[in-house]
Amino acid sequence: MQFDLSIFNPKARPLIGLDMSSSAVKMVELASDGKSGYRVERYAIEILPRDVIADGNIANLEAAAETIKRAWRKLSTSTRAAAVALPTSHVITKKIIVADGQKAEALEVLVESEANQYIPFPLEEVNLDFQIVGPAPSSPEEIEVLIAASRKEKVEDRVAAVEAAGLKPMIMDVESFAVFASLDLILKQLPDGGKGQIIALVDVGANVTSLTVLRDGQQLYAREQAFGGNQLTQDIARLYGVSFAEAEADKRRNALPENYESELLQPFVENMALEVSRALQFFFTSTQFNKVDHIVLSGGCAVLPGCDESIALRTQIDTIVANPFADMVLSDRVRANSLLADASSLMVACGLALRRFDQ
Ligand SMILES: Nc1ncnc2c1ncn2[C@@H]1O[C@H](COP(=O)(O)OP(=O)(O)OP(=O)(O)O)[C@@H](O)[C@H]1O
Ligand SMILES: [Mg+2]
């Protein structure tokens, strides 16, 4: 079996967490601080031209590499090693239970034959990796193994873009795993660390809004819908007669005329709350669950003024804006205010940067 790039590579450091999402290239570099703490060394966000990355696919490799290069220069680091991630929809993951105490080669053979059964492509076209999760819940003689598989071309596209930008891809993770690593840090901020609580992670990005419901690290439900900040950007472009790129920059800089708030922002925030409440209703009607204890709101739209209150009001659920850096120390280079405004959109980049500390 060929492990071109390991999803579970324990030995990479120092490391940049590099997220290539549809709206921007985002980078985070963390260092350890004290016994169990982290320090945010630096971070950078560089907006991507539209349609360079669409549905997780790199449509324009040159433009993607250029943007990665610009983000890296902005980051101002000497570190070139990067942890990147595949979109969750590009990866098939499966947990299998196998007998404990097997030799590595035997385990590989088992994983491969198991993968053969449910991966709808020839194995030669697939990057396959696995990790032992721990003892199986049902029996002490067995272990749980997590398998992750993705089309080679998806992996190669990302690697090519990162390498063309002069960086070294060391780890290929999965976006959802990176998000969960960041979410773990956020849940520590909740009473009792969020133990036993039903958590709805709502991510409102540029194009997509996703709802993931979890309890004690177990995913109970996940669903995506087409809603995001690009709609607001488009409305800004239309109302003020500017290009999409200008509208996007003005929105992020908060440099819009006075009537922006009442004409566009407030209606968008109302819509956002409605979308979230509908997504939750759908979760309730399609599962046996009938409550959520906390909403964690992430994605770039989570910083729109008043959206957490609107969502809390409409859903009657405690809502917090995601900030995985809340308990971290900041280096002198990082401005606290800027990081606070960007933190909710850095879940993937932060989770990837945390891979530096894998044992
Ligand atoms: N400071 C800000 N003020 C207002 N809107 C912002 C701000 N920062 C980011 N956004 C908006 O958030 C959206 C980008 O969010 P995010 O970075 O989470 O999306 P993405 O992960 O690239 O997109 P998707 O998840 O849809 O693929 C954009 O619409 C952007 O305009
Ligand atoms: Mg996103």
Image (tube, rainbow, N blue to C red):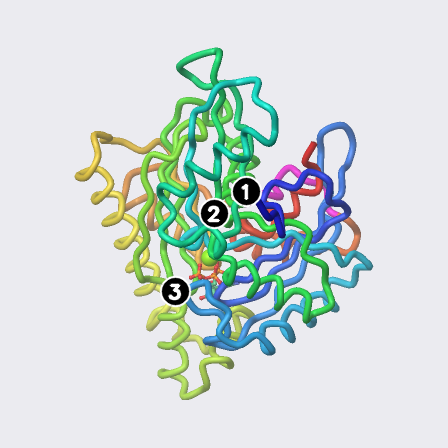
Q: Residue furthest right?
A: 78
Amino acid under disc 3? Asn
> Mark 3 near ligand 1 (CB under 8 Å)?
yes
Name the spot of residue 118 as percent of width and height, x first: 35, 43
Q: Using the image as rendered, state which of residue 269 and residue 112 is in the foreground.
A: 112
Name the spot of residue 332 as percent of width and height, x first: 79, 52
Report which residue position mark 1 lands on. Answer: 129
| Up-down relation of residue 115 to residue 241 (above or below) | above
Question: Residue at (48%, 12%) from the top-left corner?
Answer: 141
Q: Residue 187 bears which disc, if any?
A: none
Q: Is the C terminus in the top left, top right, bottom left or bottom right quadrant? A: top right
Would residue 295 be found to the left or right of residue 60 on screen? left
| Marks 1,2: beta carbons within 8 A | yes
Q: Which residues are magenta?
A: 323-330
Amino acid under disc 1? Asp
Report which residue position mark 2 lands on. Answer: 149
Name the spot of residue 268 as percent of width and height, x first: 33, 64
* Residue 270 position by quadrant: bottom left
Report which residue position mark 3 lands on. Answer: 207
Q: Residue furthest top?
A: 140
Q: Using the image as rendered, state which of residue 281 and residue 235 is in the foreground.
A: 281
Assess disc 3: are there few (<14), some (14-19) or many (≥20) residues with their C-alpha within 10 Å of its C-alpha: some
- Mark 2 or mark 3, earlier in chain: 2
Would residue 162 be found to the left or right of residue 305 on screen? right
Marks 1/3: CA distance? 30 Å
Q: Name the main secondary structure of what is drawn in magenta.
A: loop
Question: Residue at (67%, 56%) from the top-left corner?
Answer: 169
